[in-house]
Amino acid sequence: MKLALYRALPMVLAIALGSATAYAEEFRGRTPGEWLDGMNVAFAELDYDGVFSYYTGIELSTLRVTHVVQDGVQRERLVHLNGEPREIIRHGDEVACILQPGDSMLELASSIPSGPFARAFTRSFDEIGDVYTMAFHGLDRVANREAVRLAVMPQDGDRYGYRLWIDTATGLLLRSELVDGNSARLEIFQFATLDVGGPIDVAVFDLRVGEGSVISHLTLGPHAQPRLEGGEMRWEATWLPAGFAMASWDIRRTPSNLKSINTLMYSDGLAAFSVFIEAMPLAGAGEMVSRYGATVAVTNLIMGPDDERHLVTVVGEVPTETARRVALSVRYASR
Amino acid sequence: MSDKLKEFLSAAMDDEADEFELRRLLDEVSEDQSLHAVWQRYHLVRGVLQQGRFGSRAAPAHSIDSLWRRIDAGEGLDEQVAAEVRSAPSWVGRMAGAAVAATVALAIVLGFNLSEQDALEGGNLLADIQPSTLDQRTLGADVQNAAVRPALDEFPSRVDMQRMRAYMLHHAQHTSMYHQPGIVPFVKVAAFQSR
């Protein structure tokens, strides 16, 4: 009798929890982690052409994306459909940004350190199971396509959750929502139309620059660029949310005044935050919190080497309290 | 608080203080509670002015561009701010002069730690104040009486907001380049700079 009750318990639970567990561990023979991995592969390997919107919690952008794999190399074009013409054309790791004069990305492009920031985040989604719980939530329809709904919910309050709608036919992500602990949606990404596998004219990937536009070139990926000579990262966050690990670090010396900015990046496999540390001898700035949609920035002044004041800034898609705790924990390891 | 210090404080608010004055002021502010309160009120007023008077102004192009270069420049940034203040029309008073510079900060503001409601109330609070008809002292007094809430006290300076915004952009760009899948963060970078 007792044994029978134990055996019946999972089923009772499943019924009690409703549709959330109705799909149990697998949907159409694949686990949630396999669906996520499949999503990444689909984005990289399929040919597709679609229009999507991206809502940051403050602004709504609408873009067209065209992607093909030609001779084993990815070609991709992202075009802003509203506002000033801006677009990104990618050929493998080479990226050309067609921008407006004065866009901040122009300035940033030259300062991007491509070496140290290796692709550290590409860990398997199966490994995020320690800090996120994944569950299927039935079927839905997005961009007139059948989608399986997948919830990736955090097991603690130190990170946000995701709701994903994945195309059952191709594995492409059709819609995603970033949600906080109160289930409020912080960001929404959604395709309005999507054509997969149809013929695509590769002429769209040719670089065409309109009058008044400017081009900025970037290289993605682990291309050699030496770290700062003698550079050694002595700063560290002494408190991290569970599952977060340092993904990369960088010391950048700015060309104009040789001031160095230390950058640390941490990730739990899905969420990421950056920690910036710079000397701030004259600062009036102190603790400050700023938020743009799901992105929060928290600052804190601390004493660094030689009793010099340093400004710590934590930026990431994490709850404010998490960013604040990290910012307060940053220390300089003297030796 | 001495008149001299008040003068320093005004100059600092208008970004006209020199480095020596600024150092002294920072030392004094950190030690003197009443001076600290005045400092905070002035910052509040500046924030309110920029919101109430200049809130509808579009982002000046020069505030968006060359962010990183300006942050690199460090103190050079302050000089640039000061230059903008000084070039304001002569009818603009000292506080309003600071507000002109602060509109640039407004363009950069990514959203404070205020709820929407707070922001609205802050706007109303300022809408009643006409910067050109009030001198600095009465403005400060009005704001003092208006039950300032803690969230508004520490209004970030333009430089602070610029730095914050640049770091946000850097973070978005780094994650866009090294995070998978690439499509969503890429859009975010674009969204940041299109504002």
Image (cartoon, grey):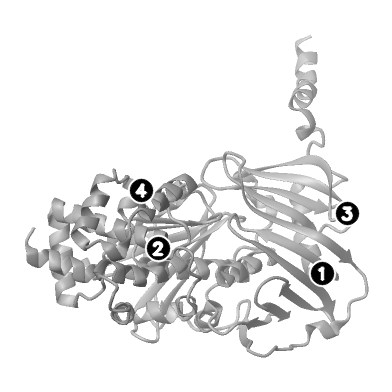
Residue A279 falls left or right of residue B6: right
Give the amino acid at mark 3: Asn
Q: Badge 2: how crowded within 10 Å, few (<14), some, or many (20+)?
A: some
Q: What mark, if any, has residue B53 been given in the picture? A: 2
On the image, the x and y values in percent for residue B48 come to 36, 57
CA distance separating discs 2 and 1: 52 Å
Nearer-the-camera pick, B90 or A325: B90
Q: Nearer the viewer, mark 4 or mark 2?
A: 2
Q: Badge 1: how crowded within 10 Å, few (<14), some, or many (20+)?
A: some
Q: What mark, if any, has residue B151 been given in the picture? A: 4
Q: What mark, if any, has residue A144 been given in the picture? A: 3
Residue that mark 1 sits on: A45
SS label for mark 4: helix
On the image, the x and y values in percent for residue B116 come to 49, 48
In the rendered view, tell whether residue A160 sits above or below residue A297.
above
CA distance separating discs 3 and 2: 47 Å
Give the amino acid at mark 2: Arg
Question: Circle 2 marks a residue in which chain?
Answer: B
CB within 8 Å, label 4 to label 2: no
SS label for mark 1: helix
Say which residue appears at 42% left-offset and 78% top-offset: A252
Mark 3 and mark 1 on one chain: yes
SS label for mark 3: loop
Residue A214 found in image quarter: bottom right
Give the amino acid at mark 4: Ala
Residue B26 found in image quarter: bottom left
CA distance separating discs 4 and 2: 21 Å
Residue A31 falls left or right of residue A326: right
Say which residue appears at 85% left-offset and 63% top-offset: A194
CA distance separating discs 1 and 4: 48 Å
CA distance separating discs 4 and 3: 45 Å
Mark 1 and mark 4 on one chain: no
